[in-house]
Image: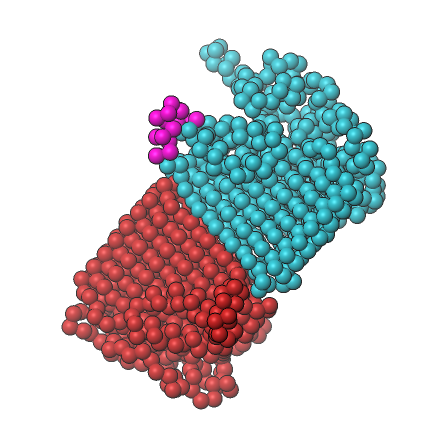
Amino acid sequence: MEDQNQILNNITEQEYKYGFVTDIETDTIPRGLNEEIVRLISAKKEEPEWMTEYRLKAYAHWKTLPMPSWAHLDIPEIDYQDIIYYAAPRTTPKYNSLDEVDPELLATFEKLGIPLEERMALAGVAVDAVMDSVSVKTTFKDTLSELGIVFCSMSEAVRDYPDLVRKYLGSVVPYTDNFFAALNAAVFSDGSFCYIPKGVRCPMELSTYFRINAAGTGQFERTLIVADEGAYVSYLEGCTAPRRDENQLHAAVVEIVVMKDAEVKYSTVQNWYPGDKDGKGGIYNFVTKRGICRGENARLSWTQVETGSAITWKYPSCILAGDNSVGEFYSVALTNNFQQADTGTKMIHLGKNTRSRIVSKGISAGRSQNSYRGLVKVGRKAEGARNYSQCDSLLIGDRCGAHTFPYLEVENKSAVVEHEATTSKISEDQLFYCNQRGLSTEDAVALIVGGYAREVLNKLPMEFAIEAQKLLSVSLEGTVG
Amino acid sequence: MNRSVEQRLLDLYVANVDIVGEGFSVGLNSQRREYIEAFNLAGIPDRKDERYGLSDLRTLFDSREWEHYFTPVQLSALGGESLPSSRYRIEVNNGFCTETELCRLENGVVYGSLRTALQEEVDSARLHYNTVADNKGASLTALNSAFMQDGSFVYVPEGVELDEPILVFHRYGAGAEDVMGFGRTLLVFGAGCRARVQLIHAGDHGEGVDDRGSYLADYVREICVGEGADVHLSEVSDFSGNCHLLLESYVSQETRSRCEIHTVDLGEGTARLDYTTDLTGREAESYLYGLYLHGERERCDVGVTVNHLVPECRSYEMVKGVASGEATGSFTGRVYVAQDAQHTDAFQQSRNLLLSPEAHIYTRPQLEIYADDVKCSHGATVGQLDAEAIYYMRQRGIGEDEARRLQLHGFVNDVISHCCCESFCDWMTARAERKIATI
């Protein structure tokens, strides 16, 4: 009996250890959402009047919107009054040393190949210097500012570069865009701002990898990237830390403005906590990502590897307004257990001779549902627009689902739009071949999936690609046999 | 026009409930009430419904005070138009069969008026009526089920091989008023039979058509294909501009059956063609070839849904569209593979040509798959005529118009050449050629 109590205690303690981060923060700001809360968030961030007004307008609009229900997703009802909309960065460390961290978590890090310091940072261990993004940025701040590149948090940007922020914030994703964009505009906690001046090639990859983790339960970030004429930047967004959290809403907005001759590459490796094997817990990842190619010859490329989140619902999009601009979308979305994903892209061709390419690879395992939904729209004036889309689905197991919902809307007669999709499973022959050569079935599946996703992984920056590859194997664990 | 469309239709139904149900069984009539209520609840699908987002049906229903004739009317013959010859023939005017007597062939084949078949309690009609279309949640189908008075009926018994195709000729026309109608077709094919059916939807091309009102047809078709049956359907809709056809076609296929449908839309009005196929028996095969050719301000929405409910079935769809002038064409396809419907082989294609700056093409081929050991793929293209091919032909002394025509001919021929018999194929080709010349 005593043993049982001990076990019970352990379990409850464990849950406390991971799940109750928000409880500490309840002191900071009360639960729920109303005008006062919006004002409070704005006040806490010491924002100027125009920003507060912007938030309030967004909130007023959000109130008029119903929660959208068109996606191929089964979303439990979300009580928006039961969410804490502002969680200040954690100041107290969760653990004192690595020994206290759950060994399973450490094992996962081991597999991911994340170096020790990072690993400690990711686990929320009190390690200075590397733990939050400020220090990371300061390392390179000199190099970047020499070139005139602005890379800072959104709050800093609102304070230091109000003109830039005012000019571009909401210019690609206005708060009227959709339910979650309105919510985000009203309550966004922080995010990053990046401005690359004319003709500057950013010498290094910019990343939001650390900051998201340091912000703990950062649920409503807002990212704004502006690449001025002829500029180039490659931007990474990583959420590769498995968090032991309850169902949690993550509604971010990413806006990208690409001017004439500029190029932006945006890569995401998303591994939010997907919930446990029975589908309990996990993050709801409802993100609005959109970029606009404003000038001629602008290029925008989205690459995403989605393996986490209980529910993923996002469509990184390109508005190709400038003539000869190019939009690209490369995606691998993997769902396992009870995960659900409805993801894809929108390519809106408005300028002449605009080109876009979509490569989407879906992998469903367990009891998951994985949908690709993509729009290719060619406007009336988009002479010579060209699109090619390829959507492949791979099914592992007979209880999962893979769905493809493409939308092709063509209003210009000179456009050429093509879409292809296939659905298949890993063939017995392939597995048998690998088994014969001494590979376990699990390794064989990882190998085959790696090959299947290669076309997309190749588009990622090197260090990300390796990580993503490993992530795919980790996420597939337990799908065979 | 203060009342909503739904309310007006409900009032129309209530006022005429006796005329509508006259002669039908009590059971069938009691269902009507449920259907009109179901329709009223669901309403005319509006643009928020993704499946109907591209066809503005509410505006169509609201655009006029649609009258409804509860009795047959006389329509003039097709103006100078010859129909493909056929020994077995059903003529339907505005949803009413011109012959009230059923034709019964020696081999047991029955065809003719659906009303007579239901009222004479012909088993094959009574047992299959509203079994395939029911419970689909489509409000237009419910509306049709409530107002249905007549239509066409074909029954081919087990093992019979029909030597010639049956021609079902639908004609629609209005007098001075704007008229709507609710025609219905029920085709029942017994196990192991072989049959071909040709369906023509045509407007009234008689004198003074231009002065007449519009016609709106809410037409439902049910096709039951028995075990091992082999069925081939060819369908043409060819209207004048004041006709609007809303077609919902439902097919249910049993084990090892084969059903092939060819559908060509050349009409000048608005057409919305929905095809739903349920593969309920193993190894069933379904083929659908569709074509629409449109110019001016015409529009055509094609919806194709194939439900793979059991393992080892095969489906193939190819829908081709040509939009010129200010025409709009849309295709919404959905292949659904149920859990455990393993070894499904499904392919869906949407091929489109855009010929003018004001024309629009929308295409949405969709896959919804819940089984892992399947082979499913789809493809969609939107493009224009191949400039190089035209250049090649012009180099060889073929005029530009002729070169364009030849290329279009090649594009549409894929669909037309597959249709069920040669004479019908020639007839269809001639009509398609005429249409090509106008766009």
Q: Is residue A150 above or below residue A404?
A: above
- Would residue A214 appear left or right of A369 to someone viewing this image? right
In the image, what residue occupies the spot 28% across and 58% down? B258
| Spot occupied by residue A204 in the image (x, y as percentages of width and height) | 71, 32
Whether residue B172 is visible to the viewer of this picture, yes or no, is yes
Q: Is residue B58 above or below residue B368?
A: below
Magenta stretch holds residue A440: yes
Chain letter, colour red in render: B
Q: Quadrant of residue B26?
A: bottom left
Q: Quadrant of residue A49?
A: top right
Q: Which residues are magenta?
A: A428-443
| Closer to us: A352 or B85 | A352
Q: Is residue B266 above or below residue A80?
A: below
| Closer to us: B42 or A238 | A238
| Spot occupied by residue B52 in the image (x, y as percentages of width and height) | 51, 61
In the image, what residue occupies the spot 60% across and 31% down? A462
What color was chain A assigned in the picture? Answer: cyan
Magenta stretch holds residue A434: yes
